[in-house]
Image (cartoon, rainbow, N blue to C red):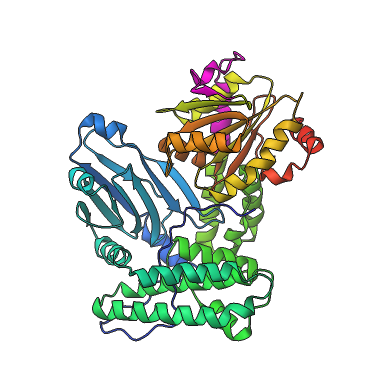
Amino acid sequence: MRKFLFIPLLFTGLLRLPAQSVAQPADPFSPEDPGFDAVYQHHGVPVVEGRVVGLTATECRQLPVTYTLVTPFAEFQSKRPVTLADDGSFTLKLDYALPYQQIWLQVGDLFFGGLYADKRLRVQLDAQKLKATNGVTFYGDGVQFTGPDAPLNVYLAEYLTRRSPDQQRLTMSRQMLVMRAGKNPDSILPAFRRMTDSLEAIDDSYVAAHPSPYSRILRNENQSGTYAELLTAYWYKRMPDSIWKHVNQHKAWCISNDGMQFYNYLAMYSPKADWLKMRLGSAVELDSQQTTLHRIAPTLHTPWCRKVVDEESERTDRNISAINAALAASKVSGDSVAFGRPLFKADFGATLYKLDHESAAGLLGRMAQAFPGKAIIIDRWATWCGPCIADMPHSKQLQSDAAGLPVVFVYLCTKQGSSEEKWKLSVFNMRQPGVHIFIDEKLDAEISSYFSFGGYPGYALIGKDGKYKPGALRDLSQIEDRKALEALVAR
């Protein structure tokens, strides 16, 4: 099943690199380069700090802030919460000493944008200016970057804010073309080339008008996106040698959506030694990730890859322990009052709750308290997530099949990008039974981090014994019928 990942439509792709009008330093190292190990050993973890000015201490405490960190693993997005200090300051924690890491920052309704962290970046957001324009995306009045990484971020953000309608239309059209490739991807190549030529011309004009050493990174990102699209069209099929030659020679410089999608899809097509082995851990559940990491680690010969995999394995162990500790800390009551007073009880078997200012540990404790002796199927979803909505009819049928079984379905819907009214309307339109909880952005980010969910939907199983069963539920489609559900509940 495909997941809805947090991937805004940003850069277009380029298939060539025209000459630049400004002096260019040496190209950055790609993670697959032999010399990257020395870069990693001496680079240091990038530092990203910021501050939201113009808010009271109370407003700072109430403002939801999350960031999604792009990582070098198959589930390449890690969503995390961050709490503003009373003076509006914050720090985004990065895990690894990797250059050019992309971070997606969401600050309430004030700001949304992609950041690139190489050494040090400071972001200042003027809340009053941002409110006056109903929020800013990427860059604008009220957004200020400072620090060594500021020029790079300004250049890329201004590029995104200046995209023309033609550029956006061509980008969408090319993505739709790839989705329609089907069994004969060769048939789309002429149209794909025409669209790419048009996008190249637009970008050539932009770079000529805005010369910068950072145009190399812009072009590399664009090229990664283009080749990622081609690789999706040729999944499990042979790509023409003339095209494969260029795809195989490409090296992504950034730990970004475009860069990591390129390597994910390339790993499916033709793995490249240690760097791509890290992409193979595509399991959603934590124990499956852990098993893959343990299997991969002894085969790695590149020091920086081995170090990152070992650290990720330790982080996964900590997450599993934290989940089970939260479940064990609950006081058993067998009463759904653990979630507070319900907003509504529907005649089709749905009970709706809303939780604000709760922690992931607190929510898991509430679940264990509310449903002792029952297995809990957790479904994390969003009202705007197509794959989430597509899974709901099967989930409804499973609940019907589950009559008499000690199992409860708990649906956690994120507030991000939605509203309480949209959530209620979705539940009622689908007539989806079960326990429905509307959670705020911070709690959604904590749940994502706990279970290492890489996108929407995300599934997890809590057993009848009140313990997390990592690896038991990776995809709802694996529960085909009542028999399969019985086997799952019995674990």
Q: Position of residue 202 (x, y in %)?
A: 35, 78
Query: In the rendered image, is residue 95 in sight?
Result: no
Q: Quadrant of the C terminus?
A: top right
Vertical arrangement, residue 191 with respect to residue 455, above or below: below
Is-magenta flag for residue 343?
A: yes
* Most foreground residue, 277 or 351: 351
Residue lying farthest to the right in this orientation: 483
> x, y percentage for residue 237?
69, 73
Q: 30 or 69: which is nearer to us? A: 69
Residue name at image x 50 percent, y 25 percent? 353
Which residues make up the magenta segment?
A: 319-346
- Asked if residue 484 lies left or right of residue 331, the reply is right
Where 173 sits versus 399, above or below? below
Q: Residue at x 45, y 45 (%)?
A: 79
Q: Is residue 99 visible?
A: yes
Residue 11 at x, y percent in the picture: 40, 67
Residue 198 vertical placement versus 436 (above, below): below
- Residue 354 placed where, x, y %? 46, 27
Front residue of 451/419: it is: 419
User: Is residue 129 rendered to the left or right of residue 120?
Assistant: left
Q: How many numbered discs, if any?
A: 0
Please indicate whether residue 488 sits to the left or right of residue 180 in the image: right
Q: Is residue 239 magenta?
A: no
Q: Looking at the image, which residue is at 76% across and 35% down?
A: 485
Q: Quadrant of residue 235?
A: bottom right
Instruction: Kindly indicate the quadrant of the structure image that contains residue 486.
Output: top right
